[in-house]
Image: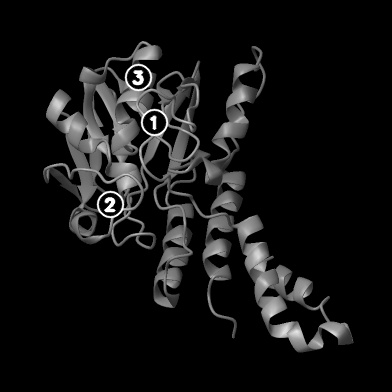
């Protein structure tokens, strides 16, 4: 059921004569309230925290699969995918917290930042490319983005903590594969949130079990015009149907994939129990369907 149906049903309750004169603004407020409840948009942090204080968004880094580690925070995700020949980092967070959160988190987990061979930037906003310049300059990591978002990155106004741009490096198109050692990452261009958002698909391991991650790289559609919203919804539709093996939904913001709810469950998991990040393909499709419905919820009412 689309969110528009829910909104219409809720709005129909506001019919008392005393509220009739205020129906239009009240209905608009109800619609907005429902959108915020069911379709929260990622919040971008403000200025960098004081050097002496721990970032308020700090999250304990964690090994989520045998070859995949969470090194993000309460706002933006960052994942370290280990291979036989180094590390592929997916998203680089903000400039102000790349050293403490991502690099520090990797070290805490026994990973070496100098082993980061590739940084896949999901899209050209500074809460995801912010740390790429430092990783490129310090560790010689290759920075991967789509053609459209290499361009978008330098023209979109930066919010929150400004970041220096990485030097233009690896340009990928839809269907390209980044290979490192025993690992392959399929690049899927999913325009909408930005013109060239990347949503990678890749394999992870849990003991003897193999799973596939579908990483949605462009969470948030509230800033788009109607044409952009339709593009976003169409990209979700295509992403859902690309690989029936995908059974782990992840996103570049924890508000969308529930990572902060799942990490404590993973920490308490006993041998033989289900993995909290593994949902199955049907649930992955349902989850992605919510992303589509959220985009459609911002379309003007007909």
Left/right of residue 171 with respect to residue 298 in the rendered view: left
How far apart marks 3 and 2 lie (CA) works out to: 23 Å
- In the displayed structure, would residue 10 be above or below residue 18? above
The residue where tag 3 is placed is: 104
Q: Report whether residue 199 is seen.
A: yes
Circle 1 SS class: strand
Q: Where the C terminus falls, by quadrant?
A: bottom right
Where does the image place residue 269, in percent across and percent down from the top left? 65, 17
Q: Residue at x 67, y 63 (%)?
A: 34
- In the displayed structure, would residue 154 be above or below residue 105? below
**Considering depth in this image, is 126 or 161 the residue closer to the camera?**
161
Circle 2 SS class: loop
Circle 3 SS class: helix
Q: Which of pointers 1 and 2 indicates the residue nearer the eye?
A: 2
Left/right of residue 189 with respect to residue 21 in the rendered view: left
How many residues crowd around disc 1 within 10 Å: few (fewer than 14), some, or many (20 or more)? many
Where does the image place residue 113, in percent across and percent down from the top left? 26, 20
The residue where tag 1 is placed is: 79
How many residues crowd around disc 2 within 10 Å: few (fewer than 14), some, or many (20 or more)? many
Badge 1 or badge 3: first in the primary sequence? 1
The residue where tag 2 is placed is: 124
Specify the quadrant of the image occupied by residue 129.
top left
Left/right of residue 15 with respect to residue 286 in the rendered view: right
Where does the image place residue 65, in percent across and percent down from the top left? 48, 22
**Considering depth in this image, is 148 or 203 the residue closer to the camera?**
148
Q: Residue 122 carries which label?
A: none
Specify the quadrant of the image occupied by residue 144.
top left
Badge 3 or badge 2: first in the primary sequence? 3
- In the displayed structure, would residue 23 be above or below residue 242? below
Where does the image place residue 33, in percent across and percent down from the top left? 66, 64
Q: Residue at x 45, y 76 (%)?
A: 226
Q: Do residues under tags 1 and 3 come within 8 Å of each other at their CB atoms? A: no
């Amino acid at each position: 059921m689309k969110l528009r149906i829910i909104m219409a049903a809720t709005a129909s309750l506001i019919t008392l004569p005393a509220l009739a004169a205020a129906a239009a603004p009240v209905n608009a407020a109800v619609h907005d309230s429902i959108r915020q409840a069911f379709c929260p948009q990622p919040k971008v942090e403000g200025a960098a925290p004081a050097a002496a204080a721990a970032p308020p968004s700090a999250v304990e880094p964690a090994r989520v699969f045998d070859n995949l580690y969470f090194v993000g925070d309460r706002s933006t995700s960052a994942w370290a995918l280990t291979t036989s020949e180094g590390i592929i980092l997916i998203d680089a967070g903000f400039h102000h917290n790349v050293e403490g959160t991502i690099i520090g988190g990797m070290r805490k987990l026994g990973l070496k930042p100098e082993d980061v061979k590739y940084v896949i930037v999901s899209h050209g906003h500074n809460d995801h490319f912010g740390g790429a310049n430092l990783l490129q300059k310090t560790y010689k990591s290759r920075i991967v983005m789509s053609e459209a978002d290499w361009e978008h990155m330098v023209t979109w106004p930066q919010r929150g903590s400004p970041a220096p741009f990485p030097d233009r490096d690896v340009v990928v198109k839809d269907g390209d594969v980044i290979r490192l050692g025993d690992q392959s990452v399929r690049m899927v261009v999913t325009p909408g949130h930005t013109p060239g958002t990347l949503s990678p698909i890749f394999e992870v391991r849990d003991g003897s079990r193999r799973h596939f991650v579908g990483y949605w790289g462009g969470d948030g559609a509230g800033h788009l015009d109607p044409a952009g919203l339709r593009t976003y919804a169409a990209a979700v539709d295509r992403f859902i149907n690309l690989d029936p093996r995908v059974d782990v939904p992840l996103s570049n913001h924890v508000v969308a994939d529930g990572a902060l709810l799942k990490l404590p469950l993973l920490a308490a998991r006993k041998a033989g129990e289900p993995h909290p990040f593994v949902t199955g393909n049907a649930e992955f499709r349902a989850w992605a369907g919510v992303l589509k419905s959220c985009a459609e919820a911002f379309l003007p009412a007909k």
